[in-house]
């Protein structure tokens, strides 16, 4: 077992991130028991086997509450909690002790300023209540600080308003004095008042015009900001596609593999109704799930997995770990990196690299495992021969509950049936048959397997002209699979068999 590890638990259905709890104990069995107890509670749980490991985690993670054992080698609970208080005074501190040692407990209270201590063996309900109360107390303290600051700001605003009112009162008093004098001067008073009213009206009209101009500028700025955000999202997606293509530059046999896995994985995630963010994380993981193979030797890159010897397979099994290390620094891909690391884990716990089992395996990783295995079987990358689609589906179904999550396998089977129905509206045409408004039903690939045009791309008159010019210039014959409206009066035809997954020659084929 490593010195410390992190476990990402599902967050509550709220916009705010779940509370983060750190458990510190030198006994792995105690940490395992605490993990089982708090897994269903919606917290993000961190584990550390000792005080030094706990301090290392606190340096990189935003922790809300710490539960530490009293008796630990090298650094005991009192020393650890004292350092936590000095460095991170906002963190709630709870002491867990199996000894009725009043001196140590008093030391923890005085030096570590703990909020509560619990004796081993603990009562589960008492433990859950202690953590819940500690987090609630922290939340109340933060809310109190926020309200104090808000009150201070409002008092300052009120003071400013009072000062303005005092100034206005003085101005009104002066105006009243002037009005009294004006009343004494009967001649020309009405004319002067009318002049002033007219000037004030003009000032207000000018101010309204400036305000309208400012509002128009703000609206334009918002539109530009939205456009910039959309461009950033598009550039981010393009960067992921480019990153995915790095592996394909080394091995042409995997051309289009990442895109096909990502597309199938997203369909499975949508069937399971994971939500937009989770579905996008799964799609990104499908595109990047083999990035860790960039560092493998060429001989191993081109070798079927079933033909690898023990040393080769041990080296091969490190690719998901390397992928996570490469992607984790990219903040938006952090969860994608977690999915990729566990893509080869199995429900029965016999996978790699961490030997996770059952619900320990992230659902996104289960989806990538099924989608990648299916695509690798029908392309001959796992076994010595290429499986037919029927054989590959049968292999996946046979592994349900053993290698793969049963719900994921059911969703996979349903998605394949949906795809078969969609292919009934699939039409293959050459550039001469392209019409404006036609939509690609399969991605258009280059001879090297790179995606030239994505699924869902709509043809225009200008683009059709460019395609024909490309064919004439490079001597190509391009083939396109497009969706056409299905005539309900037309007889059904058998679902088409997808063309070969590996493009060859000068023709551009679809995945």
Image (tube, rainbow, N blue to C red):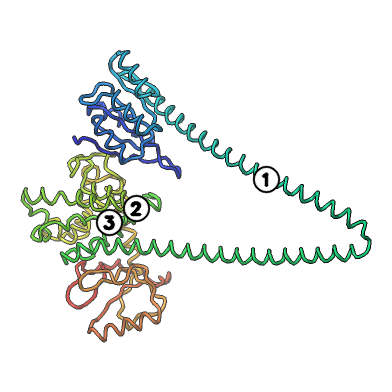
At numbered mark 1, what does the secondary structure look like: helix, strand or loop?
helix
Name which residue lies at 13% across and 56% down: 296
Kindly identify which residue carries mark 3.
Answer: 286
Q: Nearer the viewer, residue 424 or 153?
A: 153
Between tags 2 and 3, which lies in front?
Answer: 2
At numbered mark 2, what does the secondary structure look like: helix, strand or loop?
helix
Q: Nearer the viewer, residue 123 or 346?
A: 123
Name which residue lies at 23% across and 50% down: 325
Say above or below: 452 vs 114: below
**Going from the N terminus, do you reach mark 2 or mark 1 first?**
1
Q: Quadrant of residue 416?
A: bottom left
Q: Nearer the viewer, residue 273 or 407?
A: 273
Kindly identify which residue carries mark 2.
Answer: 332
Label 2 – label 3 distance at C-alpha: 15 Å
Label 1 – label 3 distance at C-alpha: 58 Å
Local crowd size for mark 2, using a 10 Å CA cut-off: few (<14), some (14–19), many (≥20): few
Kindly identify which residue carries mark 1.
Answer: 161
**Going from the N terminus, do you reach mark 1 or mark 3 first?**
1
């Amino acid at each position: 077992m490593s010195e410390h590890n992190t476990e990402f638990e599902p967050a509550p259905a709220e916009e705010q991130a779940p509370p983060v709890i750190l458990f510190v104990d030198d006994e792995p069995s105690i940490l395992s028991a605490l993990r089982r107890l708090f897994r269903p509670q919606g917290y993000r749980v961190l584990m550390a086997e000792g005080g030094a490991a706990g301090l290392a985690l606190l340096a990189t993670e935003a922790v809300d509450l710490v539960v530490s054992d009293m008796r630990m080698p090298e650094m005991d609970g009192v020393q650890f909690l004292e350092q936590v208080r000095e460095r991170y005074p906002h963190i709630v501190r709870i002491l867990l002790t199996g000894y009725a040692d009043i001196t140590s407990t008093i030391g923890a209270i005085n030096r570590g300023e703990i909020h509560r201590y619990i004796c081993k063996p603990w009562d589960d309900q008492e433990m859950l209540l202690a953590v819940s109360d500690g987090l609630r107390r922290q939340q109340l303290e933060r809310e109190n600080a926020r309200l104090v600051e808000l009150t201070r700001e409002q008092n300052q605003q009120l003071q400013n308003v009072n000062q303005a009112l005092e100034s206005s009162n003085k101005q009104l008093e002066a105006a009243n004095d002037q009005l009294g004098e004006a009343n004494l001067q009967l001649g020309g008073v009405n004319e002067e008042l009318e002049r002033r009213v007219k000037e004030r009206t003009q000032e207000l009209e000018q101010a309204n015009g400036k305000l309208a101009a400012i509002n128009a500028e703000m609206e334009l700025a918002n539109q530009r900001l939205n456009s910039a955000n959309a461009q950033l999202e598009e550039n981010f997606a393009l960067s992921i596609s480019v990153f995915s293509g790095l592996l394909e530059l080394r091995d042409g046999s995997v051309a289009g593999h990442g895109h096909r896995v990502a597309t199938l994985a997203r369909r499975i995630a949508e069937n399971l109704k994971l939500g937009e963010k989770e579905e996008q994380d799964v799609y990104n993981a499908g595109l990047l799930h083999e990035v860790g193979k960039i560092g493998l030797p060429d001989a191993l890159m081109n070798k079927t997995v079933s033909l690898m010897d023990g040393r080769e397979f041990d080296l091969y099994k490190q690719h998901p770990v390397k992928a996570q290390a490469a992607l984790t620094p990219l903040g938006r891909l952090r969860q994608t990196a977690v999915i990729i690391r566990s893509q080869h884990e199995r429900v029965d716990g016999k996978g790699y690299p961490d030997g996770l089992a059952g619900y320990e395996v992230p659902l996104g990783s289960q989806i990538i495992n099924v989608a990648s295995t299916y695509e690798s079987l029908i392309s001959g990358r796992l076994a010595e021969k290429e499986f037919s689609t029927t054989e590959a589906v049968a292999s996946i179904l046979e592994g349900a509950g053993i290698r793969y999550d049963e719900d994921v396998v059911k969703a996979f089977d349903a998605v394949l049936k949906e795809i078969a129905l969609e292919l009934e509206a699939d039409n293959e045409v050459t550039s001469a048959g392209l019409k404006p408004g036609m939509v690609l039903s399969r991605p258009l690939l280059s001879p090297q397997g790179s995606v030239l045009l994505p699924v869902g791309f709509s043809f225009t008159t200008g683009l059709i002209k460019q395609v024909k010019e490309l064919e004439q210039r490079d001597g190509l014959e391009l083939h396109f699979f497009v969706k056409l409206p299905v005539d309900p009066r037309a007889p059904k035809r058998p679902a088409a068999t997808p063309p070969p997954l590996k493009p060859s020659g000068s023709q551009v084929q679809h995945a």
